[in-house]
Image (tube, helix red, strand yellow):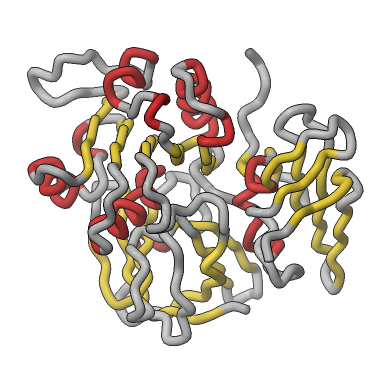
Amino acid sequence: MNVPMNYLDGNAAAGELSRIFAMDVTSAQGQCAHCGTIRRFAEAHLYMQAPGVVARCAVCDHVLLRLVNARQHMFLDARGMTYLRLNM
Amino acid sequence: MWRVGTVVALHDETMMARTIALEVPDWPGHVAGQHIDVRLTASDGYSAVRSYSIASAPNSEGRVELTVERLPNGEVSPYLTQELARGDRLELRGPIGGWFVWRTQQTEPIQLIAGGSGIVPLMAMIRWRLATAGSAPFRLLYSVREPGAVFYRGELQALSDRSNSVSITYAYTRATPKDWSRPPGRIDATLIATGTWPSNLGPTSYVCGPTSFVENATDLLIAAGYGRESIRTERFGATGDRK
């Protein structure tokens, strides 16, 4: 198998996500907009080598979320998820 | 957002790893398994952030312990393990993470599987289980390179000497103690069969280690009948950097 083992878990994004969200996103359940799988965000595969954070579906590898820091701004792209169910 | 912790104690766990005890005045308390982000800023303004698991059990004294492994080419870990001194201050963010945690309300059998420094968040769970005299049965499968690389050795030894606490199985990948029955090697199906809870007991498992270690252990657990939803994982990259 030659798949590079360079990803982490969605857990590892918790610090960055805590800058934006009041609640813990990593224990929320999200649905992949591509394959429909519903899983905890913590179970996503996380790539942090990019200038930002990219979370991919653990099943189909589709991008779920991107978070990019650009000096005074932060870009959040979450269109890879149809929804995120947070624990109140 | 960022808090400041003061180093109150330092303790070497192995040749490569050091425990750093911090006092954080406004610490809100943590749950066993959570991590914090540490930010170091150079005089020219360059800053680096790394995630480290909390090793200490939840407490109300605002005390947080991290165990940091030194990475030869690391940007942050050589400083934390070699230069940091008592009285120094560290910027930190946290506690972080709500998924890779163990809470005392969980009474099902708990299977912990650690690869190298992946023991750190699992140790927080073990310490919390002992501190609260919980009833959840714990087992730990701890994979390390060699006997000298075991973190918290004395504490774990004392645990395995006590009946009715945490049962521990070691797996050595490079060198074993003398007269060790199993040759050095990765965790395999045999070790999973003998060193972990049978899946029919409905255990929850926590697996922490380098990415390839977590992949291997998770595949073996699933092959042994564990449901994917009962396995919680925390990976760190090939460099050991959590970020």
Q: Quadrant of the N terminus of chain A?
A: top right
Q: Which residue is located at x 73 percent, y 28 percent? A: A59
Q: Which residue is located at x 64 percent, y 74 percent? A: B44
Residue B120, given in percent of the width and then of the height, sits at 37, 50
Residue B33 falls left or right of residue B172:
right
Residue B187 in view of the camera: yes
The image shows residue B228, relative to residue B13, as above or below, that is above
Q: Quadrant of the C terminus of chain A?
A: bottom right
Residue B38 falls left or right of residue B59:
right
Is A20 or B129 nearer to us in this picture? B129
The image shows residue B60, relative to residue B97, as above or below, that is below
Residue A71, given in percent of the width and then of the height, sits at 82, 69
Is B233 or B14 nearer to us in this picture? B233
Residue A81 falls left or right of residue B97:
right
Residue B145, given in percent of the width and then of the height, sits at 30, 30
Q: In which quadrant of the rendered view does residue B86 lie?
A: bottom left
Residue B69 in view of the camera: no
Q: Which residue is located at x 67 percent, y 60 percent? A: A87
Residue B142 falls left or right of residue B179:
right
